[in-house]
Image (cartoon, helix red, strand yellow):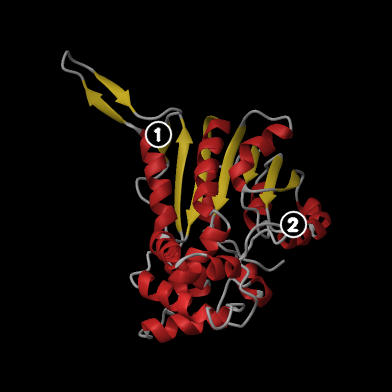
Amino acid sequence: MTHVPVLLQETLEALAVKAGGVYVDGTLGRAGHAREMLRRGAARVIGIDRDDAALAEVSAALDGMSEATSGELILRKGCHGDLAEIVRAEGMEEVDGILLDLGVSSPQLDDASRGFSFRADGPLDMRMDRSRGLTAADIVNSRTAAELTEIFRTLGEEPHSRRIALAIEKARALRRFETTLQLAGLVERIVGRSGARHPATRVFQALRMAVNDELGELSRALVGGLGLLKPGGRFAVITFESLTDRMVKRFFADHAGRMVSLQQGGARWEGVLPRVRPVWRRAVTATVEERGANARSRSARLRAVERV
C-alpha cells in the first residue's frame, strides 16, 4: 500500500498516541494513520470502513503490518456513525482516542469505476458501500428540480444550483444520466468554465454527500465517539469541505463550553456534556511541503479535543 495519509504527524500529535492505548480509526481507508498508531505502541486499533475494497486491501497487508508492530488491528465493516456500537460489540466501553478522516479517499477518486471523479468517465455511482443504497444516478434521475436544487445548494454550496437542477430535469427527459462525464459536461455547459477548478466540483461533492449521508454519519459519529472517550482521551477529525469543518467546529465548541460570571460572584461552566477542551485554538492545516507533495492535503483541516 503506497497511500500517503494526510496530516499524519499532526494527527498523531493530536491523538497523543501512547503505548498500550486503545484507539478507533472510524474511517480506516488504506490504514495509513492506523499503522502509525500501532508503530507508536497502541495495543489495539479498531479500524472501521464501509468500503469493501479498502478493507480487503488492508486485510491482505495485515501480515506485513504485524511484523512491524506488537499491537492488533481489528477490521470491521460499518459506517463511522455506528462506531460506538461497533466498539462496544468488541467488549469495550472506553477508548483512548478516535480519528475520523472524512471525505473521499485518493484510491476511491482514482478508480473511475467508483464514479466519484470526472477526471475519467465511469458509472455515476459514488457509493462508498457498493453493496447497498441509492447511486448518484438514481438521485439525479429521480429527484425533482426543487429537490436537486436543495441538494446542490445545501451540500455543495453551489451558487448555480437551480439552473443546474432545471437543466438536469430537462436533459434526462431525453436521455437518462448514467456516467460521470455526461453529468460533468452538462454542468460545464450550463455554468461555463473559468479558472482551474472544474465547474462540476460542487455538484459532485453534493451528490457524494447525499448518496452516503455524510452529514448524518458525521453527526452520529461525533456524539457516539465523544461518549466513548476516557477522561484525557482525544478526538481528532480531518475535514476537506467547509461544510463538514463548520459542523465539527461547532460541535466541539458546544462541548468546550465557556465560563460565565455569576452576579453573586464566581463563575460557572456552561456547555454541552461531556465536557472537552480544544487541543489547539484553531484548525491545523498542511505544511507548504505537504501541500506541494500531496494536492489532497491543500483543503485538509484538522481539529482535535480532549475529554475533560
Amino acid type, callout 1: His
Rendering coords of residue 85 (x, y %): 66, 36
Residues tagged 2 and 1 counted as in contact (Cβ below 8 A): no
Query: Any mark on residue 255, and which?
Result: 1
Q: Secondary structure at mark 2?
A: helix
Q: Secondary structure at mark 1?
A: helix
Amino acid type, callout 2: Leu
Based on the displayed image, in which of its 4 quarters is residue 242 positioned? Answer: bottom left
Based on the displayed image, in which of its 4 quarters is residue 71 positioned? Answer: top right
Q: Name the residue rendered at 53%, 69% in the picture.
A: 140
Viewer-closest of 51 and 231: 51
Task: Please name the residue that numbered disc 2 is placed on.
Answer: 55
Q: Name the residue rendered at 32%, 26% in the picture.
A: 270
User: Can residue 20 be seen at all in this image of the molecule?
Assistant: no
**C-alpha span from label 2 to label 1:** 33 Å
In which quadrant will I find the N terminus?
bottom right
